[in-house]
């Protein structure tokens, strides 16, 4: 009796019908878990190259928010030393100028941020400063979007709305040729 | 008698090979994924800084990568310890950037070319001198859309 039993079992084949499903399951698993190294960062549009020096003398001084970063990674904002942590709030106040202070920008449309660094400045510091300045604009855009359209500013917004907001508060960031005092390595 | 014939009939309990193609395809897909997504062999140590205002790059084929950083330990004998530029998988100088951009550009259809982005993967501890040289070269070769590649800074609710 026992013998016939084993023989009966040997006759059974493994059901391979579900093998394909298992394979697909594995495939999907690998597809999902393989980390696609996402590339994120700060998107910047460089100005086209021209051999002439840009003429900045006709700009009113009150509209220019000058940020200097030296080779020791220290900040000088409108002739005053500043820490990176304060930069965002300060820049926002300068651009929007809610109390119409005489030495801040006439309107957000006129505000110009001038960024100048040294060849010895750390890239990390430079990017942190850039990040704060961009953050200041991002926050101003967000505030305007909420006030006008009742929704936060995002890339999913209709293009016309984004354009209107950016027309109201255009981000003008000019980068000067860096100075060459610090030591490069 | 019946016993004998029975034994012969089930003598070949072959494992079905019907699923073999699936398995092979699975492996194929897996390796395709891995080889396409693998970054070019980095000869530099690049530790990008962390920031808060991030933008995501959408189309991967429109992005070319320029690495700036110090050579890793094993390459320091050949390339020294000062920051270098890597294009593709070889160490290069600033003057080779225009050719590199052109080689990337010709592979793409005309309509997509204005959206080409250069992603600068720069080590945080590098000084701005070499970065500035790269930027100047990019401007001169009319490649104006650039991306300072960076990681996300943790502990900040704002995106």
Image (spheres, coloured by chain):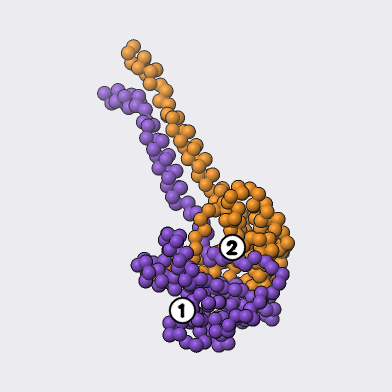
Chain colours: A purple, B orange
Q: Position of residue B83 (x, y in %)?
A: 67, 68
- Tally of marks: 2
**What subunit carries mark 2?**
B
Residue positioned 41% across, 36% down in the render? A20
**Which dot marks residue B146?**
2
Q: Nearer the viewer, residue B8 or B38?
A: B38
**B87 over A170 or under it: above or below:** above
Mark 2 lies on a secondary structure that is strand
Mark 2 or 1, which is nearer the eye? 1
Residue positioned 60% across, 53% down in the render? B113
- Crowding at dot 2, Cα within 10 Å, few <14 / some 14-19 / many 20+, comes out as many
Q: Which residue is mark 1?
A: A96
- Residue found at the very far left of the displayed protein: A1
Q: On the rendered image, what quadrant is the C terminus of chain B found in?
A: bottom left
Q: Position of residue B84 (x, y in %)?
A: 68, 65
Q: Position of residue B132 (x, y in %)?
A: 66, 70
Residue A62 visible in the shown view: yes
Q: Position of residue A41 (x, y in %)?
A: 53, 64
Residue A88 visible in the shown view: no
Residue positioned 52% across, 71% down in the render? A171
Which image quarter: residue A117?
bottom right
**Labels 2 and 1 within one chain:** no
- Crowding at dot 1, Cα within 10 Å, few <14 / some 14-19 / many 20+, comes out as some
Distance in Å between CA atoms under marks 2 and 1: 28 Å
**B34 over B22 or under it: above or below:** below
Left or right of B9? Residue A114 is: right
Which image quarter: residue A140?
bottom left
């Amino acid at each position: 009796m026992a013998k016939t039993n084993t023989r009966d079992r040997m006759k059974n084949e493994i059901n391979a019908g579900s093998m394909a499903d298992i394979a697909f399951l594995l495939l999907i698993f690998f597809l999902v878990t393989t980390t696609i190294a996402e590339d994120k960062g700060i998107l910047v549009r460089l100005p086209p190259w021209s051999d002439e020096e840009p003429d900045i003398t006709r700009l009113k001084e009150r509209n220019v928010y000058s940020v200097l970063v030296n080779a020791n990674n220290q900040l000088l904002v409108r002739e005053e030393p500043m820490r990176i942590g304060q930069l965002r709030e300060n820049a926002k106040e300068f651009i929007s100028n809610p109390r119409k202070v005489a030495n801040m920008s006439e309107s957000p449309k006129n505000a110009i941020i001038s960024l100048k660094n040294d060849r010895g400045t750390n890239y990390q510091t430079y990017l942190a400063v850039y990040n704060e300045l961009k953050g200041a604009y991002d926050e101003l855009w967000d505030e305007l979007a909420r006030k006008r359209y009742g929704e936060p500013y995002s890339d999913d917004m209709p293009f016309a709305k984004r354009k209107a907001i950016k027309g109201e508060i255009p981000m003008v960031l000019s980068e000067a040729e860096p100075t060459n005092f610090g030591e490069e390595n | 008698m019946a016993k004998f014939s029975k034994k012969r009939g089930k003598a070949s309990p072959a494992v079905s090979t019907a699923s073999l193609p699936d398995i092979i395809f699975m492996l194929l897909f897996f390796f395709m994924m891995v080889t396409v997504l693998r970054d070019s062999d980095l000869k530099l140590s690049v530790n990008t800084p962390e920031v808060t205002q991030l933008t995501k790059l959408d189309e991967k084929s429109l992005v070319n990568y320029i690495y700036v950083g110090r050579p890793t330990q094993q390459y320091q004998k050949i390339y020294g310890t000062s920051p270098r530029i890597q294009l593709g998988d070889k160490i290069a100088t600033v003057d080779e950037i225009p050719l590199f951009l052109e080689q990337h550009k010709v592979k793409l259809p005309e309509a997509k070319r204005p959206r080409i982005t250069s992603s600068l993967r720069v080590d945080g501890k590098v000084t701005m001198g070499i970065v500035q040289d790269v930027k100047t070269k990019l401007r001169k070769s009319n490649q104006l859309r650039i991306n300072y590649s960076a990681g996300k800074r943790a502990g900040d609710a704002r995106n």
